[in-house]
Image (cartoon, rainbow, N blue to C red):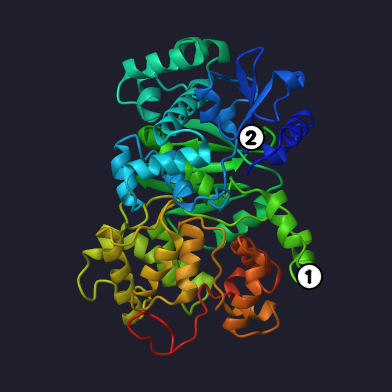
Amino acid sequence: MTFDLESCYRALASRDPRFDGLLFVGVTSTGIYCRPVCTARPVRRENCRFFENAAAAEQSGFRPCLRCRPELAPGRSPVDAPGRTAARAVARIEAGALNDGPVDGLAASLGVSARQLRRLVEREYGVTPVELAQTRRLLLAKHLLTDSTLSMADVAFASGFASLRRFNKLFRDRYGLTPTGLRRRSGAPDPADAIVLELGYRPPIAWSALLDFLAARATPGVESVEGDRYRRTVAIGKHRGWIEVAPSTRASAVRVRIAPALARALAPLLARVRALFDLNAQPSILEAHLGADPVLGPVVARQPGLRVPGAIDGFEVALRAILGQQVSVAAATTIAGRIAAAFGEPVATPFPELTTLAPTAARLAETDDGALDGYGLTSARAVCVRTLATAVADGSLVLEAGADPDETVTRLEQLRGVGPWTAHYITMRALAWPDAFPHADLVLRKALGDVPPRVALERSQAWRPWRAYAAMHLWRDFGRKSAAAINEEPEPRGRRNGRGVSR
């Protein structure tokens, strides 16, 4: 997005939360950059320089404000950037893709050369991929120094730095004070049995609706919802633990409690938490667009701040979608719990209801014929689960933010037993793609006047690029009052050809 200087200054002067995370202001008289919602005294217009991201502000020599804390700002939606490849690259960078590998590897995974990737990212964001990654590491370190009691070494490694010496030098050079100096100024929090961090979002947020959706699909032993809190077990690489997410006392933020064992996986974990709760959404923009539609307008007005739930793990969501084909949400949840108990890895947590990690693609891919019998799956669905798991395990199918949504839908539909509904639902959640639209969904079609899938798809074109939000609004408003009575994937029954398309 681009804004003229007058609009930027008005957003700053009014502390408009709609622009939080979309622009930052560098104050030339102090050398500090802030979020537009900063509560500091108003700045004179001639002393302001505006930037589209924190990395650009830091590359221009500005230091992050200690009051509004730019590291808490929500990020951008995948469709904000005109360049889809650049947006996919940034999503992976924010999840720590350059912490363990070079730009060449990231570029190759996106199907472009390293030189082309640098050019695309710099054109869209004004900084190179390496500069973006460095700013994200430093801001995460600042976050941990302020809000956690992790040791300096743990902060450095958790933020993605290869050495404590490199971390100390870059932090001092960029921010003008040492890590220990920042911690002293911020005041160390009380010691705790968990890492406690906050993540910002743009209001409003329909938190109860989010939890309703997640609670109905929570895999027993892996996830739970209690009151206004969401809890689950987590595995990222070799790290095992748990998280708890709840509203924060700070305005427009959620509070995340994280097991200390996950400290070294914080960068990808926080990116996944943001995706799970759709914290980077821009309600004012998407609701203005959808609210102007004659069909969706009244629905959107009744449900402000509705989000599209994402995923902590893409394979887990894909597995859950397949388990839910042609059965109720409650039945699919029961089956998911049985499979997690049988094939998931046990993990210790402080919550009695959380005992197991979700089964991995590698574990299910190595199962023998008949291993999934007896858990409530049909034989065809068991084969579909193994086929999906094999594709994810061997890397031929990538189910994570930053993957190409069109390619993912095509690849999914090539798997026997996966139809358009499943493919779009998985892309919506696993890739956090806001324009996914499962047009074959029975409830969506009924909400639109009991139309055939082709007509539902045609009508959805007016809602692009926010069709996933349109689907969430229609699901919640039309007939999805009782989660137990809703089919997870109501695709037509019948034989399927080799590409998984219903005949």
* Residue at 54% in and 65% down: 436
Vertical order, 106 against 338 (above or below)? above
Task: Out of 241 and 15, give the one closest to the viewer.
Answer: 15
Q: Quadrant of residue 335?
A: bottom left
Amino acid type at image mark 1? Pro
Quadrant containing the C terminus in the rendered view: bottom left
Q: Residue 125: x, y in percent? A: 52, 38
Vertical order, 110 against 167 (above or below)? below
- For numbered disc 2, what is the local secondary structure? loop
Residue 343 circle label? none
- 217 horizontally vs 260: left or right: right
**Total number of numbered labels?**
2
Residue that label 2 marks: 23
Q: Tell me which label, 2 or 1, sits earlier in the chain.
A: 2
How far apart are the two marked residues, 2 and 1, measured between alpha carbons? Answer: 32 Å
Task: Out of 135 and 95, give the one closest to the viewer.
Answer: 135
